[in-house]
Amino acid sequence: MRLLVLGGSAFLSREVARQAVERGHRVTCACRGTSGPLPDGVRHVAWDRDQPPPPDLGQDHDAVIDVARHPSRVRAAVAALPEAHWVFVSTISVYADSSVPGGTPDTLPLLDPVTTDEDPMSSPETYGAMKVACEQAVAAGAASSLIARPGLIVGPGDPSGRFSYWPERIADGGEVLAPGSPDDAVQVVDVRDLAAWLVDGAERRRTGTLDAVGPVGSRGAVLDAIATGVGVPLRATWVPQEFLLEQQVEPWMGPRSLPLWLPLPEHAGLMAHDASPARAAGLTTRPVEETARDTLAWLRATPEPPRTGLTRRDEAALLAAWHSLRQ
Ligand SMILES: NC(=O)c1ccc[n+]([C@@H]2O[C@H](COP(=O)([O-])OP(=O)(O)OC[C@H]3O[C@@H](n4cnc5c(N)ncnc54)[C@H](OP(=O)(O)O)[C@@H]3O)[C@@H](O)[C@H]2O)c1
């Protein structure tokens, strides 16, 4: 297959390009080349997608895998390559309501599209609404298409630190502040499994719209699996969300945050999508233990890895405050 990856220099799109080369495909990566190195064995076409497509982009691609967030970039690429099968990497942030567990693309309403190019980092809603417009541009213009809506993508190379916090924290041992309840839902997908499935989707010219998510686990089971993966027993103190919110701990990511935690009930659906349609369409996921082990190995081999979450000092202070409240 002649595969065009629109990206290739960052986390997911680099893994897509790497695996496609490994499978023997002829892979072109079109991007500026500023986000990081491209995998060995690809042809790089330098393209800033705010400019017209360069002549050496070529027209003979069987499939395209695109991770863009800006509607104009997707519209321009689809118009330039109308014959190719398109695999578009969207997001579960396209949904208007994240409170409903067990949702699928057939049951969950979408945000209204934002067709202009805004800053996708300005808010989750802007990011999601722009992705809705990107999806629509693909559906309207591509010869055929698969729309993949991933949930939280994790594993080695994750630039967000949103999962990495936990393998590193649990591997350090001691009393671990665990947020919310052990029964809360947690759902992740390993970048390597997602990339493999996206390349499959290009090879098979799979069509449709699917939430590209792994199985739902309880937070207790996921933290236990991470502990098994990193080989250190978990000594968790579960602290309810009300206390964390009172103490101004941020959910999800950022300074003074607890990753893999979102306030309930308003976000009860975000890490609880129905994984069975994607599984039926061939998305297989490795055990969390393996993701945790490999993520920790990557963190330890990386001089200054991306980190988010509580500092050890903040965590200790919060645990002390929680214990003193309960005395
Ligand atoms: N991380 C998650 O948990 C999560 C969850 C749901 C969905 N997603 C989706 O998953 C995908 C992740 O993709 P990713 O990991 O490869 O990282 P990304 O940050 O979404 O994409 C980066 C790629 O886009 C290229 N790019 C950026 N600006 C460009 C421009 N002006 N012209 C040409 N290329 C440009 C970058 O190349 P250069 O900078 O080198 O040009 C890089 O290769 C995204 O679609 C994201 O929305 C992520």
Image (cartoon, grey):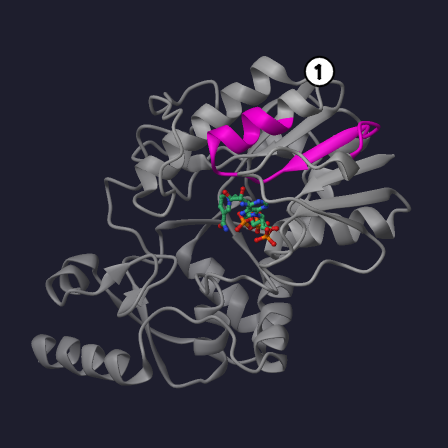
Taking the spot 71% from the left edge, 41% from the top edge, the residue there is 5
Q: Is residue 3 left or right of residue 124?
A: right
Tell me the quarter of the picture where residue 196 sits.
Answer: top right
Q: Is residue 127 visible?
A: yes
Query: Picture quarter containing residue 92?
Result: top left
Tag 1's secondary structure? loop
Can residue 285 be seen at all in this image of the molecule? no
> Is 320 included in the stretch rendered in magenta?
no
Q: Foreground residue, 98 or 88? A: 88
Tell me the quarter of the image containing the C terminus.
bottom left
The reply to whether the residue tagged 1 has its Cβ within 8 angstroms of ligand 1 is no
Rendering coords of residue 81 (x, y %): 71, 24
Tag 1 residue: 143
| Residue visible at 20% across and 58% down in the picture | 241
In this rendering, the count of numbered labels is 1
Q: Is residue 200 placed above or below 104 in the rendered structure?
A: below
The percent coordinates of residue 188 (x first, y second) are 51, 50
Compared across the picture, whether 53 is left or right of 248 comes to right
Range of magenta residues: 58-77
Residue 238 placement (x, y as % from top left)? 28, 67
Asked if 324 appears above or below 290 in the picture, the reply is below
Query: Which of these two is toward me, 259 or 302?
Result: 302
Q: Quadrant of the N terminus?
A: top right
Relative to 29, is 300 above or below? below
Q: Position of residue 297 (x, y in %)?
A: 63, 76
* Quadrant of residue 56 within the rendered picture: top right
